[in-house]
Image (cartoon, rainbow, N blue to C red):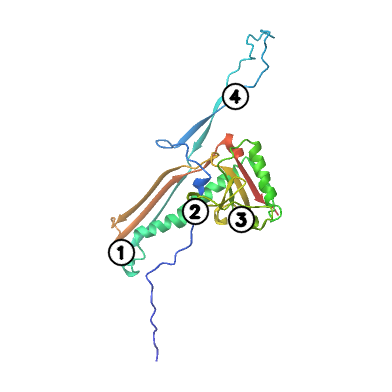
Amino acid sequence: MAIELVTKFAPYVDEIFTTESKKTLVTNRDYSWIGAHSIKVYKVSVSNMNDYNRAGADNGNWSRYGAVKGLDAITEEMTLTKDRSFTFVIDSLDTDETAGQLEGASALARQIRQVVIPEVDTYTYGVMCQNAGISATAKLTANNIYGEIIKATTALDNAEVPEMGRSIIVTPSVYQLMKQSKEITMETNIGNDLRLKGVISNLDGCNVIKVSENRLPEGFGFLMCHSVATVAPTKLEDYKLHQDPPGISGVLVEGRICYDAFVLENKANAIYYLQQGS
């Protein structure tokens, strides 16, 4: 005698854990790509200081202020390169026979949360690490991590990077080393607005931001940066739900995002990247 036992399907989806993007804390959108695919930014030189010549003309130079020279005005160009898209279909019967769990709006939100946001984050952090103006290599431990962070702070100080607005990006494992270090005392009294954005503490004036290793380059140690250095535009975000389009009984979902990230050449020293060594 064979008995088929009942299998019950609960009307819920076992979602994958994901985190919101934190890149807005360490990048900026100071430039607008509206009506353009590329932007050129001027880099203007400055003049050297001279000793003022009270005696007047000297060596044929008529100006008492020194030799008169022109200023250079060259450009750096930022062209958007990431034009990405996705599409999928949800059949009407699939929606009905999965107790509504295969539904267009929730499926689109899941796609953005689990696919789009991680891709944009990974790309942006990769650009920042690759174009950091100052880099170092060290094997981080609980004993040396504070010393390495101090080196980064000193490097940014010497580069005259603004002290207000600095951040340290760390992985969960590196954050554990920071907590184990006897030399590190982190300020955890962070404003609720910053906590909601992803700041977990403050160290030597820098906001500490914890980011999953999955969104960072292999061998990532930490990244100390100021938001003025990296421009991270999103020119277009276009997501559509088409109900019963020609040839389909159900919902056609389409999405497109055009984005990029650029480190400004004159502000590259506002990024210090430490890669884990052996």
Looking at the rendered structure, the kind of residue marked 3 is: Tyr
Q: Looking at the rendered structure, which numbered label has been put on residue 190? A: none
Mark 2 or mark 4: whose residue is earlier in sequence: 4
Mark 1 or mark 4: whose residue is earlier in sequence: 4
Q: Secondary structure at mark 3?
A: helix
Looking at the rendered structure, the kind of residue marked 4 is: Val
Q: Looking at the rendered structure, which numbered label has been put on residue 46? A: 4
Looking at the rendered structure, the kind of residue marked 2 is: Pro
Front disc: 4 or 3: 3
Report the quarter where the C terminus lies: bottom right
Of 260 and 57, nearer the camera is 57
The answer for how far apart the CA atoms under marks 4 and 3 are is 41 Å
The residue sitting at 40% across, 47% down in the picture is 237
Where residue 123 appears, as percent x and y from the top left, is: 53, 48
Q: Looking at the rendered structure, which numbered label has been put on residue 92? A: 1
The answer for how far apart the CA atoms under marks 1 and 3 are is 47 Å
